[in-house]
Image (cartoon, rainbow, N blue to C red):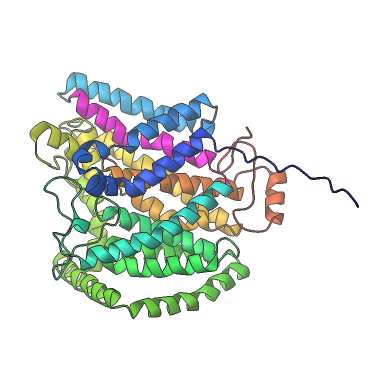
């Protein structure tokens, strides 16, 4: 009787502490609102900043384990020196308090090194796991959102994130669903990212189980009207445009996009038969018509939320008075609540205006320009990735601009989604091989498309330094 030699199973490698911190940051971003609204409502205020210690630990662990993103060191160093110098200047020459200054540094400086560290240390397998997790979470999240839409405003499901707070009123005694997030901004950003993930997974066979993909598509379709966000509708349109652009870079990609178009329409038709979808769609349509009639139409509303608010703020700015601003962090709602006991938007609600007021006209414009150029440079790299049949980064561009250029960094939810959008975009670009040397690029071109490719090249744009 032949004796078979048993090959010992390979021991599973443990997940590094740094990546465990990435997952903790991601999960806290999604479930922070649930902790504040239902689990620990008495600790709502400190839980608002629950991810900040994790962000600091990410920076420390990356430095300790030599996982620091070296090619971003100059960017981080210049940004840190500029903001720290301005912070000290505002405290000495102005009357900004140290509490407001620390909160300002937390808003303007902290998220960028965290995003760069995540982006440079996530590999293809990590991206696949994050995408799969996001799709799984989408299913119960949509069920909760539908229940919140159907529940009255005073229901426990629609509890506010702090004492006396309420969710945003929708129409016909309904509220806009917030899911497990503190407010409706959370599911708005999350759904747009999931839409990018879904399109990428659908055009890449065997990326995930088909039933999970189509269940997540159904959940996304139902989620849009119960959330009732016009911003989400615009972002989904942007994701669709990105998919169309990616389809133009080859016949094979065009055919893949066309093949999923009809199934998507079929899923939309089936979901539209649900009573909650019909009611919520009518609410969204009614809200949109009323809002656009007040704002002067869709075009004018889009201009006011994007370029119009920026141009108008620059025209109205007095560059001669208060050149160093009122102090970073001083216009934050959290700081005003701490100082006066009331939530006030001292520097306005729009991010660009807040930067002009807090940092001063010239520093504020420079900081906004930095964010825009960063998003633009990543967009160019994402287009190169799409030409290599790797469209994930391009599909994330809409969310990247929405969070990086127009997101309010002092708001924890906006800041958190900026971090993960920026990190996922950088990781997707890096995993596609953009910026690697010629030999590695030829190997990448010969490899089949999909995030299963692992590429390590020389340090450069879109590459990862061998470790």
In the rendered image, residue 317 lying in the magenta stretch gets the answer no
Q: Residue at x 19, y 47 (%)?
A: 349
In screen coordinates, is 70 left or right of 355? right
Position of the C terminus by quadrant = top right
Q: Residue furthest right?
A: 1
Q: Residue at x 29, y 57 (%)?
A: 179
In the figure, residue 320 lies in which quadrant?
A: top left
* Magenta stretch: helix, strand or loop mostly: helix
Q: Residue furthest top?
A: 92
Q: Residue at x 33, y 34 (%)?
A: 52
Q: Position of residue 194 (x, y in %)?
A: 42, 59
In the figure, residue 40 lies in which quadrant?
A: top left
Q: Residue 425 or 135: which is nearer the viewer?
A: 135
Q: Residue 364 or 347: which is nearer the viewer?
A: 347
Magenta segment range?
Answer: 97-123
Q: Position of residue 270 (x, y in %)?
A: 39, 79
In the rendered image, residue 120 lying in the magenta stretch gets the answer yes
Classify 208 as above or below 323.
Answer: below
Classify 199 as above or below 357.
Answer: below
Q: Position of residue 55 (x, y in %)?
A: 39, 34
Q: Position of residue 7 (x, y in %)?
A: 78, 44
Q: Residue furthest front?
A: 1
In this view of the protein, can residue 163 be seen by the observer?
Answer: yes
Q: Residue at x 79, y 45 (%)?
A: 6
In screen coordinates, is 394 left or right of 183? right
In screen coordinates, is 289 left or right of 3? left
In this view of the protein, can residue 332 be seen by the observer?
Answer: no
């Amino acid at each position: 009787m032949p004796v078979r030699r048993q090959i010992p199973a390979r021991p599973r490698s443990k997940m590094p502490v740094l990546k465990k911190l990435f997952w903790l940051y991601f999960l806290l971003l999604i479930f922070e609102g649930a902790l504040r609204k239902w689990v620990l409502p008495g600790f709502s205020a400190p839980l608002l900043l629950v991810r900040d210690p994790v962000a600091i630990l990410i920076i420390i662990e990356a430095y300790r384990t030599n996982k620091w993103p070296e090619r971003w060191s100059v960017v981080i160093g210049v940004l840190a020196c500029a903001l720290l110098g301005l912070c000290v200047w505002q405290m000495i020459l102005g009357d900004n308090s140290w509490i407001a200054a620390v909160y300002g540094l937390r808003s303007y400086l902290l998220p960028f090194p965290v995003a760069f560290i995540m982006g440079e240390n996530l590999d293809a397998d990590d991206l696949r796991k994050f995408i799969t997790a996001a799709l799984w979470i989408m299913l119960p999240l949509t069920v909760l959102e539908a229940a919140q839409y159907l529940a009255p405003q005073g229901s426990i499901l629609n509890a506010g994130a702090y004492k006396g707070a309420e969710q945003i009123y929708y129409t016909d005694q309904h509220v806009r669903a917030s899911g497990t997030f503190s407010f409706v901004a959370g599911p708005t950003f999350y759904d747009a990212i999931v839409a990018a993930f879904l399109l990428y997974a659908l055009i890449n066979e065997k990326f995930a189980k088909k039933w999970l993909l189509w269940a997540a598509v159904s959940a996304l379709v139902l989620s849009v009207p119960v959330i009732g966000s016009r911003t989400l509708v615009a972002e989904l349109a942007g994701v669709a445009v990105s998919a169309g652009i990616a389809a133009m870079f080859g016949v094979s990609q065009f055919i893949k996009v066309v093949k999923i178009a009809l199934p998507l329409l079929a899923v939309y038709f089936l979901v539209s038969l649900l009573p909650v979808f019909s009611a919520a769609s009518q609410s969204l349509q009614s809200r949109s018509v009323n809002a656009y009639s007040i704002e002067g139409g869709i075009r004018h509303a889009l201009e006011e939320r994007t370029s119009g608010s920026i141009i108008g703020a620059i025209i109205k700015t007095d560059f001669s008075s208060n050149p160093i601003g009122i102090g970073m962090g001083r216009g934050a709602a959290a700081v005003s609540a701490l100082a006066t006991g009331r939530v006030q938007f001292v520097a306005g609600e729009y991010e660009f205006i807040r930067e002009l007021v807090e940092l001063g006209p010239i520093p504020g414009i420079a900081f906004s320009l930095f964010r825009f150029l960063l998003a633009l440079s990543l967009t160019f790299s994402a287009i190169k990735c799409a030409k290599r049949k790797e469209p994930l980064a391009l599909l994330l561009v809409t969310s990247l601009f929405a969070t990086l250029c127009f997101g309010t960094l002092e708001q924890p939810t906006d800041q958190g989604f900026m971090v993960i959008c920026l990190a996922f975009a950088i990781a997707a670009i890096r995993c596609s091989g953009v910026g690697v040397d010629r030999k590695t690029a030829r190997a990448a071109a010969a490899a089949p498309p999909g995030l299963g490719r692992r590429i390590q090249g020389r340090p450069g744009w879109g590459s990862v330094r061998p470790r």
